[in-house]
Amino acid sequence: MRIAVATENGQVAQHFGRCQEYTLFDVENGQIRSKVVIPNPGHQPGFLPRYLAEKGADCIIAGGMGPSAQDLFAAQGIKTVIGASGPVDEVVKAYLSGNLALGPGACEHGGN
């Protein structure tokens, strides 16, 4: 499994599409095997779900994401986990252990 986390300064970014970068975690048997950070190639409607699918993501964790983006990720077979916050490593470990606390996750920014 590959988990993508929208990342800003080592923390879960509040907006999946406008983050600085994505941290990709490769997970095997519930354990993190590797991690790589890739730059955000740019926010364009519909692009990032395809891009992250091409990178092998099965799941994306972010602070916020609108319903249209959630639908686009679902169309790519990528599970969305929204409402997360905190250091990316800790968030992924909490997610894997089933202990990730989530807050509100919708983002409002004028229709994007």
Image (tube, grey):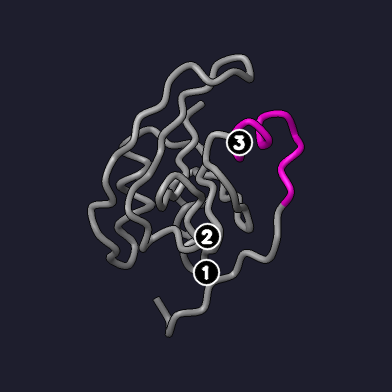
Front in this rendered view, residue 86 or 69 = 86
What is the CA distance from the residue labelled 1 to the residue labelled 2? 6 Å
Q: Which residue is mark 1?
A: 66
What is the CA distance from the residue labelled 1 to the residue labelled 3? 24 Å
**SS class of the residue under badge 3?**
helix
Q: Quadrant of the C terminus?
A: bottom left
- Residue 63 falls in image quadrant: bottom right
Q: Amino acid at mark 1?
A: Gly
Look at discs 1 and 3 and give the one toward the viewer.
3
Q: Which residue is mark 2?
A: 70
The residue shown at (51%, 26%) is: 1
What is the CA distance from the residue labelled 2 to the residue labelled 3? 23 Å
Badge 3 crowding class, 10 Å Cα cut-off, few under 14, some 14 to 19, many 20 or more, is: some
Look at discs 2 and 3 and give the one toward the viewer.
3
Q: Tell me if residue 7 is in the magenta stretch.
A: no
Q: Is residue 81 above or below residue 111?
A: above
Q: Amino acid at mark 2?
A: Gln
Which residue is situated farthest in the bottom direction here? 110
Which residue is situated farthest in the left direction here? 41
Q: At which x and y percent is residue 64?
A: 54, 63
Tell me the number on the disc at residue 90. 3
Q: Amino acid at mark 3?
A: Glu
**SS class of the residue under badge 1?**
loop
Which residue is situated farthest in the front direction here? 9
Q: Is residue 64 above or below residue 109?
A: above
Q: At which x and y percent is residue 81?
A: 60, 50
Q: Which residues are magenta?
A: 91-101
Q: At which x and y percent is residue 75?
A: 47, 52
Front in this rendered view, residue 88 or 55 = 88
- Which secondary structure dominates the residues rendered in magenta? helix
